[in-house]
Amino acid sequence: MAALPARALPTDFNDKVESALLCRSDWSTAFWQSYFDKHLQTSIRDWGEARWWSSQGAQLGGASTVEIFTNVDTSRALMLGVLIAQPVEEVKRTLEQNLRVAFKPVQTVDGLRYVSDTLSVLVGTNNQQTKWYCAKWNLGNRERVQPLAPQY
């Protein structure tokens, strides 16, 4: 099967995606899925509660991306991210230099992650790649609990 030719990315593609990756914009799953289907062609797979597209080598924050993903409709997280074929320390330096943002180390049960003030996340993978993403967790509708009236 022959690969489909790459499409030209819109001039505001980097700005829109970088803003979302830095958790500086609001978005919806439907918006990003439609946007990526239009500009990156059809998704290449659904895996790990996410839909993945080839990113056509988009340069985001000065890093060359391999794939881009957003959550599937049934996911409990509203997430947008990219996969970068470089180790996390290199990506961290590149993004901090080019985007003037600081990522601080945070040790989690799953390993070391780097988190910005806006809650943008960098995490290294086992194969020396990096996932850069923003996630907003859906905790469901919480009922408002009324405090009990004092009993005298």
Image (cartoon, rainbow, N blue to C red):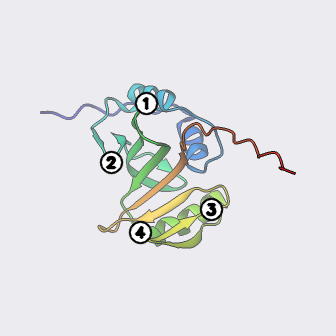
Secondary structure state at the residue bearing disc 1: helix
Dot 4 or dot 1: first in sequence order is 1
Mark 3 crowdedness (10 Å alpha carbons): few <14, some 14-19, many ≥20: some
Three-letter amino acid code at the position of disc 4: Asp
Q: Position of residue 26 (x, y in %)?
A: 63, 37
Residue located 31% across and 29% down the image = 42
Q: Residue 116 carries which label?
A: 3
Residue located 58% across and 34% down the image = 27
Q: Which of marks 2 and 1 is in front?
A: 2
Mark 4 crowdedness (10 Å alpha carbons): few <14, some 14-19, many ≥20: few
Mark 1 crowdedness (10 Å alpha carbons): few <14, some 14-19, many ≥20: many
The residue lying furthest to the right in this view is 152
Dot 2 or dot 3: first in sequence order is 2
What residue does disc 1 label? 33
Secondary structure state at the residue bearing disc 2: loop
Q: Nearer the viewer, mark 2 or mark 3?
A: 2
Q: In this view, does 17 lie to the left or right of 152?
A: left
Q: Where is residue 48 in the image (x, y as percent from the top left)?
A: 32, 48
The residue lying furthest to the left in this view is 1
Q: How far apart are marks 1 and 3 (CA)?
A: 25 Å
Residue located 47% across and 49% down the image = 59
Three-letter amino acid code at the position of disc 2: Gly
Q: Nearer the viewer, residue 63 or 46?
A: 46
